[in-house]
Amino acid sequence: MTAQPPLRVVQWTTGNVARATVQAILRRTDLELVGCYAWSPDKVGQDVATLCRLPETCGVTATDDVDALLALRPDCVVYTPLRFDVPTVERILRSGANVVTTAEFLTGHSIAGAREALAAAAEAGGASLFGSGMNPGYAQLLAAVATGICSEVRHVRSVESVDVSSFAGDSNMDGLGWGRPLDDAGHADDIRAAVAVFEDGVHVLADCLGVDLDRVDCRVDVSAAVRDLDLVGRPIAAGTVAGMDVRFLGVAGGREVIELHQRWVMSGELDPPMPAEHGYKIEIDGSPQVSLTLGLLPDQPLETLTVEDMHGIGMTITGMPVVHAIPHVVAARPGLVSYADIPTPAARM
Ligand SMILES: NC(=O)c1ccc[n+]([C@@H]2O[C@H](COP(=O)([O-])OP(=O)(O)OC[C@H]3O[C@@H](n4cnc5c(N)ncnc54)[C@H](OP(=O)(O)O)[C@@H]3O)[C@@H](O)[C@H]2O)c1
């Protein structure tokens, strides 16, 4: 076997998910971190590993000079900012760099006009764009894989059920309207808009299953805190929204065929009750009926576990699906690619 040179990777911003992706890029011998973009001016010039709170520096510093980063001719950009910026990603793709992202993009169906613009940029640059994360993202791949033993599939449901109270102050929670009054007009629409990328997740699963969707619906149910919740960064008053069931529903031939059900709660005591099950489940109505439960446990003794460690698990399962996909995305045809287009990514031992 001829040894291949490592793929040259640029990391885009150094937030929560990036801590996991940068650590993984530095560990993998088939990937080389060659640059990093900083959105925050005060991060420019600092070592990327230091910015990601890793124990040792890596010798690569962050910059806000996009031209200089693209001049490095990276094979792939790991794009994990808080917001997915279509013109920026177009620019990266046109330069010829492939992009893997966790930020608000899987297929682009949920961003008006994005699919056409990004596909054109990718074709022009001969590059591919791939989005994942845990959910939406890898959870839909797991669902697709679980159908592989069925002779018939009528409905596929994936469930994320999580107590998110330790993430209460996170910027990713801003658009969801925690603490709004129950029955607040427009709240369901605001929730749908804030997490519209789950619509992309429905399309990924539909593509894997060869289903042509008529449309994707969204149904929201909310629940109230039974007492004041003194949460770091986002206190929630009793009687206001502290739990939500957000279902994105794929409809084909007039029938619901796919459900991505997210249950996010800020407390174990809600009215009406919304018990969190702490994990992911896949349920397939088919022949045979299949259910799959994904249990996640920390890789350390429970008594030493901190809130930051718990967040770290969430960021690991978000970041690894895109890092492990890099070689497949670099090798993929130019354009927008999803799990329906690339081999199943796995970790490297
Ligand atoms: N699919 C999934 O399973 C999943 C799960 C979790 C998160 N995500 C998504 O992954 C992305 C990254 O999440 P995260 O928790 O790592 O985010 P984050 O830490 O809050 O932000 C990431 C970086 O974005 C930059 N940034 C901050 N505000 C910005 C703004 N208004 N516009 C553009 N950039 C901004 C900052 O760059 P600097 O580093 O330069 O300061 C920040 O470090 C988000 O889009 C999130 O929704 C997906």
Image (tube, helix red, strand yellow):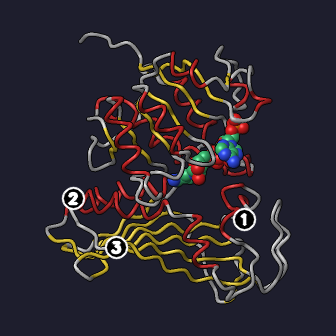
Q: Earlier in the sequence, mark 3 or mark 1?
A: 1
Mark 3 surroundings: few (<14), some (14-19) or many (≥20) residues within 10 A: some
246 to 308, vertically: above or below: below
The amino acid type found where label 1 is placed reads Ser
Q: Quadrant of the C terminus?
A: top left
The amino acid type found where label 2 is placed reads Gly
List x then y, in percent, for residue 152: 16, 71
- Along the horizontal axis of the image, is 153 left or right of 320? left
From mark 2 to mark 1, how far is it between C-alphas? 35 Å
Which residue lies at the image location 66% right of the left edge and 77% below the top edge? 243
From mark 2 to mark 3, how far is it between C-alphas? 24 Å
Which residue lies at the image location 77% right of the left edge and 58% below the top edge? 169
Of marks 3 and 1, the one in the foreground: 3
List x then y, in percent, for residue 304: 73, 46
The amino acid type found where label 3 is placed reads Arg
Mark 1 surroundings: few (<14), some (14-19) or many (≥20) residues within 10 A: some
Secondary structure of the residue carrying tag 3 is strand
328 to 261, vertically: above or below: above
Q: Which numbered circle lies on residue 165?
A: 1
Q: Earlier in the sequence, mark 2 or mark 3?
A: 2
Q: Which residue is mark 2?
A: 148
Of marks 2 and 3, the one in the foreground: 3
Q: Earlier in the sequence, mark 2 or mark 1?
A: 2
